[in-house]
Image: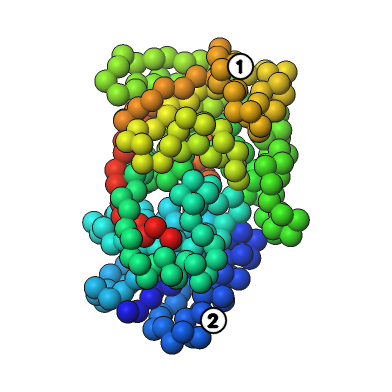
Amino acid sequence: MEYIIIANPHSGGGMGNKQFDLLIQYCKTHNLSYVSYLTQYGGEVYQIIKKLLPTLHANNRIIIIGGDGTLNESIASLIKFNQSIPIAYLPAGTGNDFSREMNFTNNIPTFMERLENEVVSTLELLSFNEKLSHTTGIAMNSLGFGLDAAICQLNTIQSKKQKSKFGLSKFSYLTPIINAFKKHKEFQASIQINDQPVQISDKNLLVGLFNHSYFGGGIRFVPTAKQNSHNFEVVVARDVTAPVILKAFPFILWNKQHFERFPENLLKQTATHACIKIQEPILMQTDGEVYSFEEVELEAKLITYPIYLT
């Protein structure tokens, strides 16, 4: 058995580098064969996988170390090369929402023990195609337009090293949420869910597709959304004023009744595929990575990919 380790050392304010060092030490101590790659910039995972594919064999096991964005890039790269090679994921991000939903471990001995058992699960992902810009990709956690994308953009700017030093909590996302709301601009969207008639929604703060409940480092924003449930939740936050967001925030953090308490402002609907059109400049996030579009014509659906249950 030979392990192929691809790690983002900068993820989680340096946690990626720490986990990489611990895993390498474990491999050396247990005389395990491995090759390793440390990424230095976004998009490098794609280049590494492109180089690796011709040499891969049945005894290889690919291990990804990093945050949700690193894992997204890894799976998306393999899909682009028409591969369905199972991968193992050692979480080392800032928010780690995907590993929280999947109950993955970040303990090295436990991780390696689970990997040796080679239990593979079929993972459901959101696959999207933005037709106007020919942008395609996946989302393991969520895909969203508006406020959540602005939060992700601001959260990237905010010092992740500081978060890592003092410990990540739900409150570490409060400042980006407040700042994003101060700068927000309402937008209109045309939304088609499954084969239902198109719905026009205006005064939108957020339009998002959620593959599971977590967003923002452990906040269960959509409590009814579950990974591998064969569907996802389409969420619209509209006509949200400052008093509404202040009233809703405690419900979002603690008792998870925000959809019931604010039915005119927070709407959700279960879907297996969806189409979204937005005819103005807008930010979009997928698993925390931010895109900018002049306008949007996006289709999304569920696809599957194999992953080791670690």
Measured in 3D between alpha carbons, the distance from the residue under mark 2 to the one under mark 1, in whole angstroms, is 50 Å
Dot 2 surroundings within 10 Å: few (below 14), some, or many (20 or more)? some
Q: Could you say which is closer to the camera, residue 181 or residue 272?
A: 272
Dot 1 surroundings within 10 Å: few (below 14), some, or many (20 or more)? few
**Residue 43 is drawn in which quadrant?**
bottom left
Residue 261 is tagged as 1
Q: Secondary structure at mark 2?
A: helix
- Mark toward the start of the polypeptide (2 vs 1): 2
Task: Examine the rendering and report whether any part of residue 40 can be seen.
Answer: no
Residue 228 is tagged as none
Q: Could you say which is closer to the camera, residue 289 or residue 211?
A: 211
Query: Which residue is depicted at the point 46% across and 49% down?
Result: 102
Q: Position of residue 182 (x, y in %)?
A: 70, 29
Q: Position of residue 154 (x, y in %)?
A: 65, 43
Question: At label 2, which amino acid type do we have?
Answer: Gln
Residue that numbered label 2 is attached to = 25
Relative side of 162 to 144, left or right: right
Query: Which residue is depicted at the point 32% across and 58% down?
Result: 120
Query: Which residue is depicted at the point 66% across and 32% down?
Result: 254
